[in-house]
Image: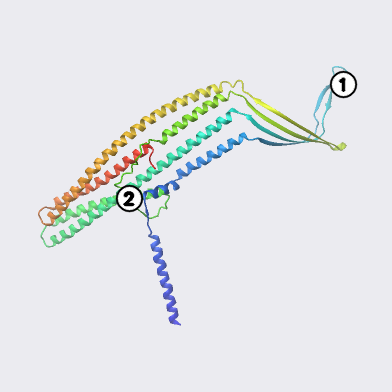
Amino acid sequence: MEVVQKNKSRGLKSKWIAFSLLFVSFQGFSQTLDLETCLKMADTASLSNRNAKLDIASNQELIRANKAALLPKVNYTGDYRYYALIPGNLLPGVISGGAPGTYTVVKFGVPYNFGNTVQLNQTIYNPLLQTGLNSLDINQKIIELQSKLTSQNIQYQVYQTFFNLQAITKQLKYVDDNLENIDKLIQNMNLLVAEKMTLSVEEDKLKVNRLNIVNQQQRLVATKSQMEYLLRILTGMAPDTKFELVTDDLMEKTILLDSKDNHNVEIDIINAQMELNLNEKKGINMAYLPTFSFYAAYNYSYNMRPETNFTKGINSAYLGVRIDWTLFDGLEKHNKAKVNRIQAEKLNNQLELTQQQLAMNIENAKKQVEIQINSLMISKEQLTLSEKIYTQAEVSFKEGVTSSNDLIKAENDLIQAQTNIISSYIQLRQAELDLLKSTGNLK
């Protein structure tokens, strides 16, 4: 019996340990993200993108609501009245045998009147309806372009954050290697000091340099933490989500597309606004025309006089065509036309200014790409030379040919070369991003 209980307790303990290990491994799970995944996540998670899509859906419903104005309308009116005092009319007295010049009050109707009317209205011609629908269609185009612009701005931030994180990760790898090298040198120096083969001040110089590297490492770790938090916000991840970026060659591979098509969204928005302005001008002119509508009504009136048990139902029906035509509106449309012309001139100026700025941005971005490519090539060469110089300085220092000052200088030059190449990568990616955004090819 005791053996069975011990086996059960061991089994429960084993299950608990397995569950604990599974929980710990789940807690420490870290997903690996590439750039394409981050862009897709940001497109779904961004609240700005969601609002932009809601604007599109809202305007679509508004278009449907305005199109409903073209359909017939059916209205019902119920009018139930009790006349405490039946109204009367004046009739000449001679009708009832009275003297000429006198009048007699005659009351028509009964105390209770129940009226029911059903009316049909159908617009036959309204010039403003079609221009209004055209304005909504053009506005739909503007909203969709604005949504696209919002999405591009989010993508731009994701690109920047992703590449900055890759750069910081690569620079931290350099720092970790530098710390490992200097720790080995300090350990060897410590042995030399213990054997009184060198002065302790030489070891202290290396320790000071190590502290500088540690300080650089801490700053990079803090910056990386900030970038990771920003990427979590952009992609909709929880604040405590652990992730790593793919270790591919995106740092060194260009992101420029083989496309010469310049299709800037901001230009498209201005062109759509100009189209909307032209449609508004057409609507102002169309407002001078009359509107036509058809209507039909059926009425049933039920009359009662309880004192005499009198009841009577009366039917009526009619058809009609209505014409509405504003012959003079106090120069309202005339002044609206002036405002429309001013807005058109502003849009033309805005289009020209935007085109000038866009051309300048594209040209500057192209030059920056060329400059940063050359800068990256120089930085690579500097890094190669700095690595050779540091390796030689390390060998010479171990052989006692050079002092620690020469080694520290070579190490500092190497660190600077590593920083320069990371900076060159980032500046090149930034120049490419600016070029893609200016030409409308950021996807």
Q: How many marks?
A: 2
Which quadrant: the C terminus? top left
Q: Residue at x 58, y 37 (%)?
A: 65
Q: Quadrant of residue 108?
A: top right
Q: Quadrant of residue 73?
A: top right
Q: Position of residue 211 (x, y in %)?
A: 23, 53
Mark yes or no: residue 122 visible: yes
Q: Residue at x 69, y 34 (%)?
A: 120
Q: Earlier in the sequence, mark 2 or mark 1?
A: 1
How busy is the neighbourhood of tag 1: few (under 14 within 10 Å), some, or many (20 plus)? few
Q: Position of residue 82 (x, y in %)?
A: 78, 36
Q: Residue furthest bottom?
A: 1
Q: Nearer the viewer, residue 135 or 222?
A: 135
Relative horizontal placement of residue 280, taking residue 98 as reference (left or right): left
Which residue is disc 2 drawn over? 224
* Marking on residue 95: 1
Mark yes or no: residue 83 visible: no
